[in-house]
Amino acid sequence: MSNQIRILLADDNNAFTDLFESRLNLYSNIKIVGVAKNGSETTQMLNHIEIDVLLLDIVMPDIDGLEILRKINEMPINPMIIIISAISSEEITKIAFSLGARYYFVKPFDCDNLISTIKSEILNAVKPNMSDVNSHIRKIVTNILLQIKIPNYIQGFSFLREIIVLYIKRNCRNNISMLYNEIALSKNIKAASVYQAIRYAIQVAYQNNFGIKSNKHNDLLFNFNGMPNNLQFIKAVASIYKLTTNNN
């Protein structure tokens, strides 16, 4: 990544783009490298401009935001994607997350909150602030979640990974409500949003039968009567982690 965080802003609302650009002028390490007013301009810029973050509206002329997300999944790029939309439909939110959106901000929102989220996510990705022990746990949990067939591009993947790492480190047993709050505070979002994103990730794993054929432990530990609740799922992954580390 360059010294500046490079943002492509895809939104046909001139009032919003002007406001956001003026707000970003207060930050020396963030720069808007392109503003697209429709879907065609967005895809064209994605093919020609190197970016770190895509701020994407859902409703735009000619190609909507969801279709752009589908196109991005076919491109050799991996920007952090944040949806900025006046649409608050739960169904559209789920689709956006499933297609790779990291966050979903409903207009009107606090621009400084959005900027803070961008800086936190990008800088943490470049300079991880974790001990070697944390990094080791995180790596193993990442592999387990991938084996369970949770796509790593959905938001719930990263939230689920973080809450499982904390659960393992602190031996939380049956109390995980505080972990939702901790993750929510670090991301400047509501705990309910963390819960729902994790719930959706578990639903995806359930629909994929927990990748039972790919790992011998899964068949034993994911033998639920229906879709597990969040705590049951987290406990199961923690158990696989213990089995994995005990066998190494």
Image (cartoon, grey):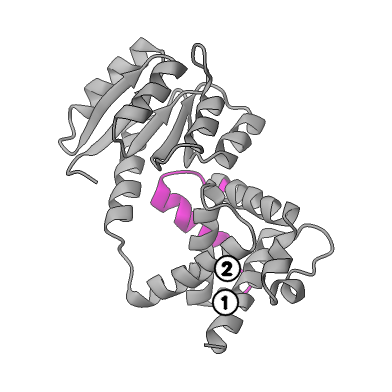
Query: Do the residues under discs 1 and 2 have CB atoms within 8 angstroms?
Result: yes
What type of secondary structure mainly makes up the magenta span? helix
The label shown at residue 144 is: 2
Observer able to see residue 176 = no
Q: Residue at x 74, y 52 (%)?
A: 207
Name the residue type under label 2.
Ile
Mark 1 or 2: in front is: 2
Q: Residue at x 52, y 75 (%)?
A: 168
Label 2: few (<14), some or many (≥20) within 10 Å? many
Quick one: 88 or 241, which is closer to the camera?
241
Residue extent of the magenta highlight: 173-192
Q: State the image quarter where residue 213 is shown.
A: bottom right
The label shown at residue 190 is: none
| Residue 218 location (% of width, % of height) | 70, 71
Quick one: 117 or 143, which is closer to the camera?
143
Sequence-wise first label, 1 or 2: 2
Residue 231 lies, with reference to residue 105, above or below; the image says below
Q: Residue at x 51, y 21 (%)?
A: 86
Determine the secondary structure under disc 2. Answer: helix
Residue with the mark numbered 1: 241
